[in-house]
Image (tube, helix red, strand yellow):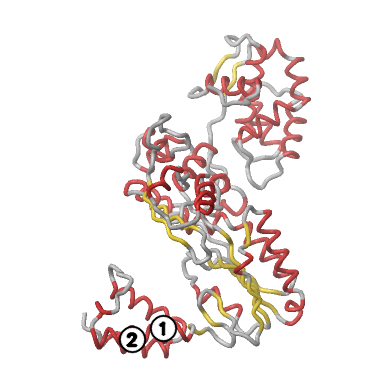
Amino acid sequence: MYRTGTTASERDCASAELLTQGRTGWSLSANRAPAMLNALIVVTLARCFLAGEANTNAICDRARAALGKNWPWLRPLARRYVARFPGPGRPRRREVEQFLRRDRGLAAAQRKHQADFENLRLIGPEPTMQPIGVARSWNVPAIASSGELAGWLGLEPGELEWFANLRDWSPPGTVPLNHYSYAAAIKRSGAIRLIEAPKTRLKTIQRRILAEILDRIPAHPAAHGFAAGRSIRTFAAPHVGRTVVLRMDLQDFFPSMRAARVQAFFRTAGYPELVADLLGGLCTHATHRRIWKGLDLPAAPELIRDAQVLYSRRHVPQGAPTSPALANLCAWRIDSRLTGLARSAGAIYTRYADDLAFSGGPEFARGVERFSIHVAAILLEEGFHAHHRKTRILHRGVRQYLAGVVINDRINPVRADVDRLRAILHNCALHGPNSQNRDNHPDFRNHLRGSVAFIESLNPQKGARLRTIFDRIHW
């Protein structure tokens, strides 16, 4: 069945697509209805326009090969298409089909050449990898069809669709299909954070996508979280000793990263639309509202309703192995715009996950409040919201800190954190580690070792003294 609100021309295109699936060529003579004939022309032209480089000559060559003739209306149509979709990204096929259905020149050609089209034999181009610009240097596997993607992941085609779950596979009234486990927590702000962890098979699939696609694509230079060779230290270092530091926070960073943005990223990498949609489906998730009934959260009903709405839309799940890298890559445009804005104001910009940092000299300090409004406006245009209650303007006269790191004169851990860790280590050495594991960490030894290593990375002298105490603990 067609979805509610589908126009007649869209239904004709959908029917034409069903007729053409799996064929390299087909005759129009069996489809005598003019509407169906025109729909087949639209479907074929859309495939031609999207099957390679988006310039007039290349489009005309592909369309001429598909239509079997160099029609005089093809080149003007190709020019109008290039003007309508200048790039750099590729439009979706439905957008191209809509453009073609509304094009007056093509409509006139269809009326004029109706009799010639009836005996036309069309040969549709096969989908190919089409990376744009800088994406051509990305060393990602070439996957041109859903069958190739299934084979690459070691899945049957039906399994691929089941895991991607682009459509709701659950019959009405049944338990929704679910490849995730859930854990919810209340943030200090009172909002709800939902951790969505993929189950074993989907996690294995996501790890391969991470290792062989996402990890091979460089993140923006301003992104320091979840990026190889970068850390909290590299995030904070550019802001040391600055006159003023502006600290901002992205609200609901992962759930605000929608599936459409993820699928557009995979198309940018060169994957055909169907492959990009399936990859996006494997890396995104929509949490069914029924899941919330079993979480038993001590939160106000209105906050639970807000969370239900937020997480019910398909998004990047916090808890999937692909999500950190994917969020960085999908935030490239945000990072580029904020880097340009900061440069125009004489400031420096870096980002660590959802933490944004800007810093500058006296001139930047004079306009920093107005600058923060511009940042919030850009975030809103990009589909995100600044967490205004967490926005801080930190001048030299106060403690300037980012992501738990003090940066007034040099990078240093927060003194209270160091003192707290020293007390825990000292008590572990005196009374045994079990007496201090109040949060029931499953691997308390490695938890403490990691905390000491973090202090060492920021201040080697303080870290060395803490490690001396750690080495005295009897495990």
Quarter of the figure with residue 61: top right
Q: Mark 2 points at which residue?
A: 467
| Front in this rendered view, residue 278 or 147 | 278
Q: Neighbour class for label 2 at 10 Å: few (<14), some, many (≥20)?
A: some
| Front in this rendered view, residue 421 or 280 | 421
Q: Which of marks 1 and 2 is nearer the N terminus?
A: 1
**Would residue 474 appear left or right of 188 to someone viewing this image?**
left
Q: Neighbour class for label 1 at 10 Å: few (<14), some, many (≥20)?
A: some
Residue 126 in the image: state x and y as whole percent: 53, 31
Residue 91 in the image: state x and y as whole percent: 64, 40
Q: Name the residue under label 1.
A: 456
**Would residue 20 appear left or right of 441 to someone viewing this image?**
right
Residue 358 vertical placement versus 452 (above, below)? above
On the question of residue 216 being in view, the answer is: no
Residue 46 vertical placement versus 385 (above, below)? above
**Would residue 455 appear left or right of 26 to someone viewing this image?**
left
| Front in this rendered view, residue 297 or 314 | 297
